[in-house]
Image (tube, helix red, strand yellow):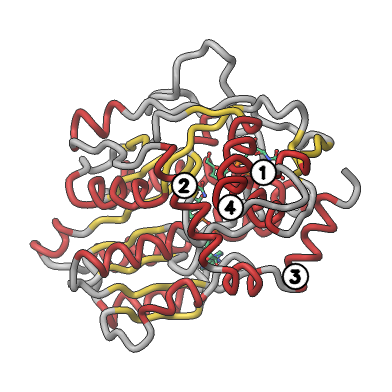
């Protein structure tokens, strides 16, 4: 048996592949286009491991996907590949429509043709697992209940609109063609291999470099944070035991304002790598807000707990400490991802703020 993972060189995908192969010998075919966010170094520990087949390619390349399906006969597709950064979607939405919408469409069509031709047992076992986000539900007020799976879709950014579109395609391919799909909508992840364009890794790497820590707006936007290893275990639970055609929210029961997050990182760095120039919080800088910035996300993860017995294993305190320590222990990884293209992005996003 084999699984086909898309986007397995990105942040969550690489954590998923590494976790998967730590727990089982079932091979992984890893299809990734190696955009700026894809990084083969995340998977360096698998070099030479015959259980991991890396394929450099695009999910929108239907002929390639068909060939991979015919050759490897996977029992499941776990679909992480996406453009994932809200700020980039504001500066350049086209890539988000191309990969998240058209790419998911192409993958669904290839999966449908492959699944339709499978025989009884293999056909019944096959799963298409679509990995999505809580951002499709829009923004909550301070006292609103957390998002359940029945919350209306109200995406507000080009990123979340493109993910919402992909969720709808996946749903329709199940409803119309019977493709055996499951979808998970997860809250904000953090942990090892997180590209330093997102809040938590950006704050860690900037603090260590003595650079400003740019908080958008008043810093009181709320996100629900989940350690990436817990997201991976949630995906495995839904892939193995989730009901067909259902969606499952995955979250950490851990709402924090951005201010709290940044202050926590500064305090941990003060403890683990004190700066002779003074406490890291001196670097905090409030900058112009993100256009259309969603105020609050919160996930109600009761359904996955009730049906599948899944709960996060990590607390925020344990997860954020591990994460900060990981960045302190991997200066080479940090240096390598801050290439010329990364510096261009920093200038584009922060230059005029
Ligand atoms: P990421 O940006 O770190 O990685 C995305 C990966 O997809 C990269 O390796 C990239 O090279 C690859 N990719 C992009 N376009 C591709 C294409 N056309 N064909 C093949 N590969 C392509 O993203 P991430 O943070 O790891 O997120 C993974 C998935 O999880 C996404 O679908 C995202 O929407 C979802 N998600 C992310 C979070 C989060 O907090 N990061 C939370 C919930 C859901
Ligand atoms: O909720 C799940 C989503 O979480 C995923 O679907 C996305 O792929 C992922 O990128 C993430 O989206 P966010 O926009 O919430 O994450 P980001 O790390 O970009 O920002 C988190 C919060 O921090 C948000 O309120 C904006 C703020 N922020 C972010 C950056 C990069 C800042 O204040 N300053 C910054 O420099």
The crowd level at tag 4 (other Cα within 10 Å; few <14, some 14-19, many 20+) is: some
Ligand 2 image-quadrant field: top right
Q: Nearer the viewer, mark 3 or mark 1?
A: 3
Give the Cα separation between the discs numbered 4 and 1: 10 Å
Name the residue located 54 percent from the left edge and 57 percent from the top edge.
194
- Say which label, 2 or 4, has the lower sequence index: 4
Image spot of residue 139 (x, y percent): 59, 25
Residue nearer the viewer, 338 or 341: 338
- Residue hosting label 2: 321
Q: Nearer the viewer, mark 2 or mark 4?
A: 2
**Which-is-in-front pick, marks 1 and 2?**
2
Q: Could you tell me if the residues under marks 4 and 1 are in contact, i.e. CB atoms within 8 Å?
A: no
Residue nearest the observer in this picture, 165 or 350:
350
Residue position for label 3? 341
Q: Which residue is mark 1?
A: 158
Determine the secondary structure under disc 3. Answer: helix
Q: Where does the image place residue 68, in percent across and percent down from the top left? A: 35, 78
User: Badge 4 is on which residue?
Assistant: 84
Q: CA distance from mark 2 to mark 3?
A: 29 Å
Question: Distance from label 3 to label 1 (Cα)?
Answer: 22 Å
């Amino acid at each position: 048996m084999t699984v086909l993972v898309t986007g397995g060189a990105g942040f969550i995908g690489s954590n998923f592949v590494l976790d998967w192969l730590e727990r089982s010998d079932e091979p992984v075919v890893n299809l990734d286009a190696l955009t700026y966010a894809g990084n083969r170094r995340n998977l360096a520990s698998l070099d030479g491991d015959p259980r991991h087949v890396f394929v450099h390619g695009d999910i929108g390349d239907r002929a390639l996907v068909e060939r991979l399906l015919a050759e490897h006969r996977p029992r499941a597709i776990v679909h992480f590949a996406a453009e994932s950064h809200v700020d980039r979607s504001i500066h350049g939405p086209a890539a988000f429509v191309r990969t998240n919408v058209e790419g998911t469409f192409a993958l669904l069509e290839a999966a449908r043709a492959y699944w339709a031709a499978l025989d009884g047992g293999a056909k019944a076992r096959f799963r298409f697992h679509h990995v999505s986000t809580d951002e499709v539900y829009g923004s909550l007020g301070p006292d609103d209940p957390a998002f359940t799976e029945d919350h209306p879709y109200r995406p507000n950014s080009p990123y979340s609109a493109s993910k919402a579109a992909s969720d709808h395609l996946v749903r329709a391919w199940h409803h119309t063609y019977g493709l055996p799909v499951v979808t998970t909508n997860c809250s904000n992840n953090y942990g090892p291999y997180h590209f330093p364009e997102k809040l938590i890794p950006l704050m860690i790497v900037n603090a260590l470099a003595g650079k400003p820590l740019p908080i958008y707006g008043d810093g009181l936007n709320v996100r629900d944070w989940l350690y990436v290893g817990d997201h991976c275990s949630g995906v495995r639970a839904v892939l193995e035991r989730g009901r067909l055609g259902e969606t499952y929210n995955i979250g950490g029961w851990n709402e924090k304002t951005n201010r709290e997050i940044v202050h926590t990182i500064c305090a941990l760095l003060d403890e683990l790598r004190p700066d002779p120039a003074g406490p890291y919080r001196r670097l905090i800088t409030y900058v112009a807000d993100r256009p259309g910035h969603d105020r609050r996300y919160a996930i109600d993860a009761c359904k996955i707990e009730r049906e599948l017995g899944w709960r996060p294993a990590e607390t925020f305190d344990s997860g954020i400490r591990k994460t900060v320590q990981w960045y302190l222990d991997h200066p080479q990884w940090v240096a390598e991802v801050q290439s010329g293209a990364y510096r261009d992005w920093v200038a584009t996003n922060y230059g005029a703020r």
